[in-house]
Image: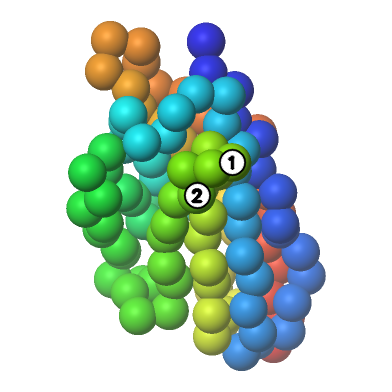
Amino acid sequence: QVQLVESGGDLVQAGGSLRLSCAASRNIFTGTMAWYRQAPGKQRDLVASITDVGITNYSDAVKGRFTISRDMFINTLHLQMNSLKPEDTAIYYCNAEFKNLGIYWGQGTQVTVSS
């Protein structure tokens, strides 16, 4: 079993920045980690991902504004979000996929961007 605990969600004005964190109970450098988001009434979509060897991928909606990173010393995944827009408002979920262990989700953290 793997535990993922997100933090950092908040209310911020458009153009502002937030940094989300996801603390994991397992070495995050051994799996693929990702951030998803789900707005009210919409499906959960991939925001950004990073593989075990550090290959990153971003959705077109956030490319150039968001950065996914990992901190090996505290086993934490981050999402730096800059130039936030009202359409970034959603619950953001941390996701982890480990070979032979399965897929895990955090409980989510709310990000609200006011115009």
**Above or below: residue 79 compared with residue 61:** above
Residue 95 lies in what quarter of the image? top left
**In-front residue for pair 39/109:** 109
> Would you say residue 38 is visible in this rendering?
no
Taking depth in this image into account, of 15 and 54 the one nearest to the observer is 54
Q: Residue type at mark 1?
A: Ile
* Residue 30: mark in rendering: none
**Amino acid at circle 2:** Asp
Task: From the image, tell me which residue sits under label 2.
Answer: 71
Q: Which residue corresponds to the image point at 43% horizontal and 79% vertical from the top-left?
A: 65
Q: CA distance from mark 2 to mark 1?
A: 6 Å
Q: Do the CB atoms of the residues marked 2 and 1 lie less than 8 Å apart?
A: yes
In this view, 64 is above or below 54:
below
- Rendering coords of residue 39 (x, y %): 57, 56
**Viewport quadrant of the C terminus:** bottom right
Which percent across, then down, holds residue 62? 39, 72
Front residue (pair 24, 102): 24
Q: Is residue 34 above or below residue 12?
A: above
